[in-house]
Structures are given as C-alpha cells and as structure tokens.
Image (cartoon, rainbow, N blue to C red):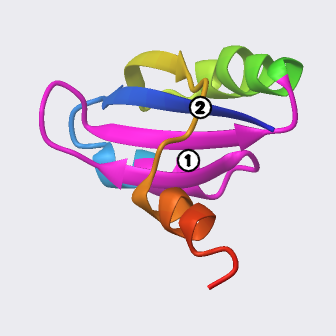
Amino acid sequence: MVTSIILLKARRGAVKRLAENLAERPGISEVYSVSGNFDLVAIARVENNDALADLVTSELAEVDDIAHSETMLAFRTYSRHDLQSMFSIGM
C-alpha cells in the first residue's frame, strides 16, 4: 500500500465542489478543508506507485477545479493510535 498526501489549491469558489469530487474517487480515502496556503488536503491510499502515478498525473490532472497541487509520498506512519496498539499487546 502506498500512501500520499496531496495538497490542493482550488479555483475560486470551487472548494466544496472539488472536495466532494475528490472524496468520491477510488484511491482517495479522506479529504480535509484546511487553513493556510492550500485549500484542501487529500489522503490517497493506493496499491502501488503506478496506481498513484495514474491517480495524480492522469485523473487529477483532468480536474478543472484544481488550480495547483503538490503531492508528497509518505514513507512511514507515526501516530498515537499505532503506538497505543503496539504497547497494548498482551494487556
């Protein structure tokens, strides 16, 4: 499984429409509206790098409501939830 974080700037007035569009796409597990330099953060979880390349460079490149995007590849997950699960084994 490959996880990536996709930062998106939406065209003016298109944040909600873009978020709903992304949330319905296979491979996109979550979409967050955020403050700061970007309007949305999408979390993509796909089978492999080829699937990620198809999602980002083929599918998302065709979405008119995206003004700009940056894609980051996640190497490891560090979360409180994962740590709690690990340390609760045998309790």
Left or right of residue 91, residue 83 in this image: left
Does 48 sit above or below residue 23?
Answer: above
Residue drawn at 25 percent across, 37 percent down? 39
Foreground label between 1 and 2: 2
Left or right of residue 46, residue 9 in this image: left
Which stretch did the figure color magenta?
19-48
Q: Is residue 35 magenta?
A: yes
The spot of residue 12 in percent (x, y) is 21, 33
Amino acid, disc 1 = Leu
Mark carried by residue 59: none
Quick one: label 2, few (<14), some, or many (20+) residues within 10 Å? few
Residue drawn at 56 percent across, 56 percent down? 23
Left or right of residue 19, residue 61 in this image: right
The spot of residue 37 in percent (x, y) is 16, 24
Q: CA distance from mark 1 to mark 2?
A: 24 Å
The residue at which mark 2 appears reads as: 76
Residue drawn at 56 percent across, 29 percent down? 63
Left or right of residue 33, residue 73 in this image: right
Which image quarter holds the C terminus? bottom right
Quick one: label 1, few (<14), some, or many (20+) residues within 10 Å? many
Mark carried by residue 22: 1
Does 67 sit above or below residue 65?
Answer: above
The spot of residue 55 in percent (x, y) is 73, 28
Q: Secondary structure at mark 1?
A: helix
Q: Secondary structure at mark 2?
A: loop
Q: Nearer the viewer, residue 22 or 2?
A: 2
Amino acid, disc 2 = Arg
To which quarter of the image does residue 56 belong?
A: top right
Q: Looking at this rendering, what residue extends furthest in the bottom direction?
A: 91
The spot of residue 59 in percent (x, y) is 71, 27
